[in-house]
Image (tube, rainbow, N blue to C red):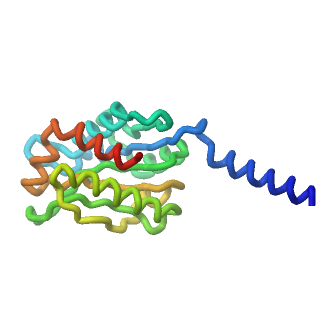
Amino acid sequence: MRKIVFLFTLFLASTLFATDNNDGKRVIVLDPGHGGVDTGVKSEDFQEKEIVLEIAKLIKARNKFQDTEFIILRTEDEQMSNENRAKLISNFNPDLVLSLHVHSNVKSTVKGLEAHISPMNNCYDDSKKYAEKINHKLMDLGFENIGIKENNTKILRDPQAPTVMLHIGHLTNEEDKAIVTNEKNYTIIADKILEALE
Ligand SMILES: [Zn+2]
């Protein structure tokens, strides 16, 4: 009996240790999409790669959670392959991954928030919860909510953590564009995303 108790304690300790691998801190990786020659969606002078980088920096700067550390995958205007992004993400051993994008559509009438998650990710259910919560908060800016779509791209599939690709509106729609290119909204977008992570 004593041996069983010992083994159970050992098992418990190892699982605790395994989940507490970042000094007890919650590590959230922010992945601003695109970069370098890969601009993402463009409209007039506005480029997706710049918008999402600004928002990522603001999320990190406005973080008030004592127990949470944000890591931004690219802090400069540099091109990164999906393979590299996925590799870097796994090195950080994150508790959550948020990939930041602005969407586009051939139809300029298509608008709204659209979050992508992968059914092949181990943490699909939690990914879905975060996606719903964040989209719900971002609706406060006046966005419509298209909802959640499934996407098995490497960045969403590989991480051993809840992973969500956010599309913060459509740059190809005039109403969304007015929201997502107004720099005054960037701090609000950052704060709404932070609120969803409480
Ligand atoms: Zn994108």
Q: Quadrant of the N terminus?
A: bottom right
From the viewer's side, name the closer residue of 129 and 47.
129
Q: Who's the residue at 39% across and 56% down the image?
A: 130
Q: Position of residue 165 (x, y in %)?
A: 35, 55
Q: Who's the residue at 13% across and 47% down the image?
A: 179
From the viewer's side, name the closer residue of 130 and 149.
130
Q: Who's the residue at 47% across and 56% down the image?
A: 162
Answer left or right for 183 relative to 150. left
Answer left or right for 167 relative to 13. left
Q: Position of residue 122 (x, y in %)?
A: 53, 63
Height in image: 77 above or below 112?
A: above
Query: Quadrant of the rendered structure where residue 30 is?
Result: top left
- How many numbered callouts? 0
Answer left or right for 185 relative to 90. left
Height in image: 138 above or below 187?
A: below
From the viewer's side, name the closer residue of 88 and 146.
146
Q: Position of residue 86 (x, y in %)?
A: 46, 50
Height in image: 197 above or below 145?
A: above
Query: Quadrant of the rendered structure where residue 150 is?
Result: bottom left
Answer left or right for 174 relative to 23. left
